[in-house]
Amino acid sequence: MKMKPILVGVFLLMVLAACTAPKPTTQTPGVEAGQLTVMTHDSFAVSAELIAQFEAENNVKVNFVKGGDAGAALNRLLLTSMSGTPEADVFFGLDNTFLSRALDNDLFEPYAAPALTEIPASFKLDPQNRALPIDYGDVCINYDKAWFESKSLPLPQSLVDLTKPIYQGLLVVENPATSSPGLSFFLASVAEFGESGWQSWWQALKDNGVVVVSDWETAYYTNFSGSSGRGSQPMVVSYASSPAAELIYAETPLEESPTGSIVADGTCWRQIEFAGILKGTPKRALAEKFIDFMLSKPFQEDMPLQMFVFPVLPDAALPEAFMRASAIPAKPAVLDPLVIAAQRDGWLRAWTDLMLK
């Protein structure tokens, strides 16, 4: 199926900065009255109408600064914060793989936003409310429905299943050292098999012909048979919202997405994205209002079609295509953020030695 060009960028790190997003600026916060600077990762997008409404209601101009991917944006914040001149008032885009690093470096000021009382405890990973959950998405194995139906092959229902001979050469994954979904899938394997068992599982996966590529775009649009590239692998590490995007952006209207997600227990990794008020901001009151705005129902309901993520607010309505095409795993894999922070670099070195050498 050929897809509209916008889908090509929808999922970079989960998604693309849509053309409706406000243009970023590089103005320094605190210099002009009525200015609020928000740093985000490159995938941030929001409807221009919503930002205009926030600006009008609060008599403020919001300046967005794109800081790179989540890791690069965090590094940029760390550098500017150490100099005593933080580059922004609010930061959005920190995820649970980098959470402990940001908190250990004391980047954010606590803020008990009123909406936190409505958000499930599973999303609230910082008891001090320095990092507030805004959205989530699940990295899962996507599959080509037509391919599996044509072969009468059952879908794998566990990570162990992927090492069985019937799935030899059918899976493409991304390098966890260079790809966010690749890292998420890797962390799911560590959560499932433990520090003493993940290498054996990856060796078995390698022996079973797993294909490793550097990034999500290559995996999805070149290797995956269920995408426009019509590649050779009918399974790919992608997002639980990818089938919804295939449905929404199909050139010919479809009743059903041509792809699906495997959401069996322990096979997916949940990415939770956070926002925080940067320590030392002179715009504390406005920063609180912006956090409240991000946790409001209009913003939460805008996110799915802007960034292809799910809202953390339970009563936020999802687009109809999401309800039809996206599956939410009941039990995604879980690892302590402190363990991730302490072990990630060593794990990735070991993975590289095992899989690429």
Image (tube, rainbow, N blue to C red):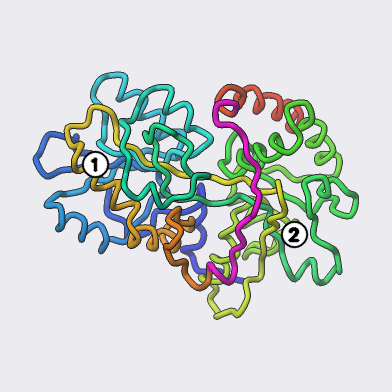
Along the viewing direction, whichever of 229 and 346 lies nearer the viewer: 346
Residue under numbered circle 2: 234
Q: Specify the label residue 201 is tagged with.
A: none
The image shows residue 70 at horizontal and vertical percentages of 45, 38
Query: Is the residue 343 above or below the residue 190 in the image?
Result: above
Apparent side of residue 262 relative to residue 166 in the rendered image (left or right): left
Dot 2 lies on which element? loop
Q: Quadrant of residue 40?
A: top left
Dot 1 lies on which element? helix
Q: Quadrant of the N terminus?
A: bottom right
The residue under the point 58% across, 40% down is 179
Query: Is the residue 322 above or below the residue 112 in the image?
Result: below
The image shows residue 237 at horizontal and vertical percentages of 66, 50
- Part of the protein shown in magenta: 322-339
Q: Quadrant of residue 212?
A: top right
Mark 1 nearby-residue class (10 Å; few <14, some 14–19, many ≥20)? many
Residue at far top of view: 83
Identity, as a three-letter code, of the amino acid under mark 2: Pro
**The magenta stretch spans residue 338:** yes
Along the viewing direction, whichever of 348 and 273 lies nearer the viewer: 273
Residue under numbered circle 1: 287
The image shows residue 62 at horizontal and vertical percentages of 21, 48
Apparent side of residue 88 relative to residue 316 in the rendered image (left or right): left
The residue under the point 70% across, 34% down is 190
Q: How many marks?
A: 2
Question: Which label's residue is closer to the chain start, 2 or 1?
Answer: 2
Query: Is the residue 310 above or below the residue 349 in the image?
Result: below
Identity, as a three-letter code, of the amino acid under mark 1: Ala
The residue under the point 55% across, 69% down is 323
